Image (spheres, rainbow, N blue to C red):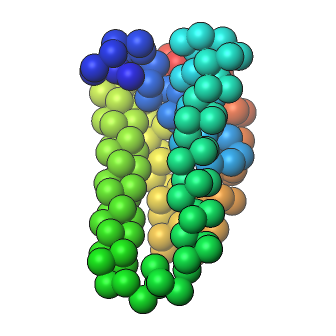
Amino acid sequence: VVDEYHWLSEEEALNLTAIGQSAPGLLAVNTAIGIGYHIGGIKAALVGVLATALPPLITLTVVSYMYEEFAANIYIRYILKGMQCGATAILISVVWDMLVKQMKKKLALPLLIIGITLVVHLFFKVDLMIALVVAGLIGLLFMKAEKYS
Protein backbone atom coordinates (compact mmCIF):
# COMPACT_ATOMS: atom_id res chain seq x y z
CA VAL A 1 0.00 0.00 0.00
CA VAL A 2 2.84 2.41 0.85
CA ASP A 3 6.02 1.15 -0.77
CA GLU A 4 4.75 -0.79 -3.76
CA TYR A 5 1.53 0.93 -4.83
CA HIS A 6 2.05 4.37 -3.22
CA TRP A 7 -1.65 4.63 -2.35
CA LEU A 8 -0.83 6.11 1.06
CA SER A 9 2.08 7.92 2.65
CA GLU A 10 3.87 6.10 5.46
CA GLU A 11 2.37 8.49 8.00
CA GLU A 12 -1.17 7.90 6.69
CA ALA A 13 -0.66 4.13 6.86
CA LEU A 14 0.66 4.34 10.43
CA ASN A 15 -2.26 6.55 11.46
CA LEU A 16 -4.81 4.20 9.92
CA THR A 17 -3.10 1.21 11.57
CA ALA A 18 -3.18 3.00 14.93
CA ILE A 19 -6.88 3.71 14.47
CA GLY A 20 -7.40 0.06 13.49
CA GLN A 21 -5.63 -1.05 16.67
CA SER A 22 -7.70 1.17 18.90
CA ALA A 23 -11.08 0.32 17.36
CA PRO A 24 -13.00 -2.72 18.59
CA GLY A 25 -12.60 -5.73 16.36
CA LEU A 26 -9.81 -7.35 14.41
CA LEU A 27 -6.80 -5.18 13.58
CA ALA A 28 -6.55 -6.38 9.98
CA VAL A 29 -10.23 -5.79 9.25
CA ASN A 30 -10.25 -2.38 10.96
CA THR A 31 -7.16 -1.31 9.06
CA ALA A 32 -8.62 -2.62 5.77
CA ILE A 33 -11.75 -0.55 6.40
CA GLY A 34 -9.70 2.57 7.09
CA ILE A 35 -7.35 2.17 4.15
CA GLY A 36 -10.15 1.15 1.78
CA TYR A 37 -12.32 4.09 2.78
CA HIS A 38 -9.37 6.49 2.53
CA ILE A 39 -8.48 5.26 -0.95
CA GLY A 40 -11.90 4.71 -2.55
CA GLY A 41 -14.78 5.35 -0.19
CA ILE A 42 -17.38 2.90 1.06
CA LYS A 43 -17.08 0.43 -1.85
CA ALA A 44 -13.33 0.11 -1.35
CA ALA A 45 -13.83 -0.29 2.41
CA LEU A 46 -16.25 -3.15 1.73
CA VAL A 47 -13.78 -4.79 -0.68
CA GLY A 48 -11.07 -4.40 1.98
CA VAL A 49 -13.24 -6.13 4.58
CA LEU A 50 -14.10 -8.99 2.23
CA ALA A 51 -10.50 -9.41 1.08
CA THR A 52 -9.32 -9.46 4.67
CA ALA A 53 -12.05 -11.59 6.24
CA LEU A 54 -12.88 -14.19 3.57
CA PRO A 55 -9.51 -16.00 3.27
CA PRO A 56 -9.20 -16.80 7.00
CA LEU A 57 -12.92 -17.60 7.20
CA ILE A 58 -12.63 -20.09 4.34
CA THR A 59 -9.40 -21.53 5.75
CA LEU A 60 -10.85 -21.95 9.24
CA THR A 61 -13.99 -23.55 7.85
CA VAL A 62 -11.90 -26.12 5.99
CA VAL A 63 -9.67 -26.69 9.02
CA SER A 64 -12.67 -27.12 11.34
CA TYR A 65 -14.05 -29.91 9.15
CA MET A 66 -10.69 -31.67 9.17
CA TYR A 67 -9.53 -30.69 12.66
CA GLU A 68 -8.33 -34.11 13.77
CA GLU A 69 -6.13 -34.52 10.72
CA PHE A 70 -4.71 -31.00 11.08
CA ALA A 71 -4.13 -31.27 14.83
CA ALA A 72 -2.15 -34.48 14.44
CA ASN A 73 0.03 -33.16 11.59
CA ILE A 74 3.42 -31.97 12.82
CA TYR A 75 3.99 -29.81 9.71
CA ILE A 76 0.74 -27.93 10.26
CA ARG A 77 1.81 -27.21 13.85
CA TYR A 78 5.13 -25.82 12.60
CA ILE A 79 3.36 -23.68 10.01
CA LEU A 80 1.01 -22.26 12.67
CA LYS A 81 3.94 -21.48 14.97
CA GLY A 82 5.67 -19.68 12.12
CA MET A 83 2.55 -17.67 11.38
CA GLN A 84 2.29 -16.73 15.05
CA CYS A 85 5.88 -15.47 14.99
CA GLY A 86 5.23 -13.50 11.80
CA ALA A 87 2.13 -11.81 13.25
CA THR A 88 4.07 -10.91 16.38
CA ALA A 89 6.86 -9.41 14.29
CA ILE A 90 4.38 -7.25 12.35
CA LEU A 91 2.81 -5.94 15.55
CA ILE A 92 6.22 -5.18 17.05
CA SER A 93 7.21 -3.33 13.88
CA VAL A 94 4.09 -1.14 13.94
CA VAL A 95 4.52 -0.37 17.64
CA TRP A 96 8.20 0.43 17.13
CA ASP A 97 7.43 2.79 14.23
CA MET A 98 4.84 4.60 16.34
CA LEU A 99 7.27 4.86 19.28
CA VAL A 100 10.07 6.23 17.09
CA LYS A 101 7.67 8.80 15.63
CA GLN A 102 6.72 9.97 19.12
CA MET A 103 10.37 10.06 20.25
CA LYS A 104 11.27 12.30 17.29
CA LYS A 105 8.65 14.81 18.41
CA LYS A 106 10.36 14.97 21.84
CA LEU A 107 7.09 15.46 23.68
CA ALA A 108 6.97 14.04 27.19
CA LEU A 109 3.25 13.24 27.51
CA PRO A 110 2.93 10.68 24.68
CA LEU A 111 6.12 8.93 25.81
CA LEU A 112 4.88 8.94 29.40
CA ILE A 113 1.55 7.39 28.34
CA ILE A 114 3.37 4.71 26.33
CA GLY A 115 5.72 3.93 29.23
CA ILE A 116 3.02 3.81 31.89
CA THR A 117 0.78 1.64 29.71
CA LEU A 118 3.64 -0.82 29.22
CA VAL A 119 4.55 -0.86 32.92
CA VAL A 120 1.00 -1.37 34.21
CA HIS A 121 0.44 -4.20 31.75
CA LEU A 122 3.73 -6.02 32.21
CA PHE A 123 4.45 -5.51 35.89
CA PHE A 124 1.04 -4.97 37.47
CA LYS A 125 -0.73 -7.47 35.18
CA VAL A 126 -3.47 -4.99 34.21
CA ASP A 127 -5.43 -6.38 31.26
CA LEU A 128 -4.03 -4.91 28.05
CA MET A 129 -7.43 -3.80 26.75
CA ILE A 130 -8.14 -1.91 29.98
CA ALA A 131 -4.69 -0.28 29.84
CA LEU A 132 -5.27 0.75 26.21
CA VAL A 133 -8.71 2.18 26.94
CA VAL A 134 -7.33 4.22 29.84
CA ALA A 135 -4.41 5.41 27.68
CA GLY A 136 -6.89 6.39 24.96
CA LEU A 137 -9.00 8.35 27.44
CA ILE A 138 -5.91 10.13 28.75
CA GLY A 139 -4.98 11.01 25.19
CA LEU A 140 -8.50 12.26 24.53
CA LEU A 141 -8.46 14.46 27.63
CA PHE A 142 -4.91 15.81 27.59
CA MET A 143 -3.59 15.65 24.03
CA LYS A 144 -5.91 18.01 22.18
CA ALA A 145 -3.18 20.58 21.49
CA GLU A 146 -1.93 20.96 17.91
CA LYS A 147 1.60 19.90 18.88
CA TYR A 148 0.37 16.33 19.47
CA SER A 149 -1.11 15.79 15.99
Residue 103 appears in which quarter of the rendering? Answer: top left
Q: Residue at (69%, 32%) from the top-left corner? A: 140
Q: Residue at (48%, 74%) from the top-left corner? A: 123
The tally of labels here is 0
Between residue 35 and residue 141, name the one nearer to us. 35
Q: Position of residue 84 (x, y in %)?
A: 39, 65
Q: Position of residue 93 (x, y in %)?
A: 32, 45
Between residue 2 and residue 22, name the one nearer to us. 2
Vertical relation: 135 (above or below) 146: below
> Residue 44 vs residue 3: left or right?
right
Q: Residue at (60%, 40%) from the top-left corner? A: 29
Residue 45 appears in which quarter of the rendering? Answer: top right
> Residue 71 vs residue 51: left or right?
left
Quarter the N terminus occupies: top left
Q: Residue at (30%, 77%) from the top-left corner? A: 75
Vertical relation: 34 (above or below) 69: above
Q: Position of residue 101 (x, y in %)?
A: 35, 30
> Residue 15 vs residue 100: left or right?
right
Between residue 119 and residue 85, name the one nearer to us. 85
Q: Is residue 131 visible?
A: no
Q: Position of residue 41 (x, y in %)?
A: 66, 12
Vertical relation: 97 (above or below) 43: below
Vertical relation: 110 (above or below) 134: above
Q: Is residue 23 visible?
A: yes
Residue 98 appears in which quarter of the rendering? Answer: top left
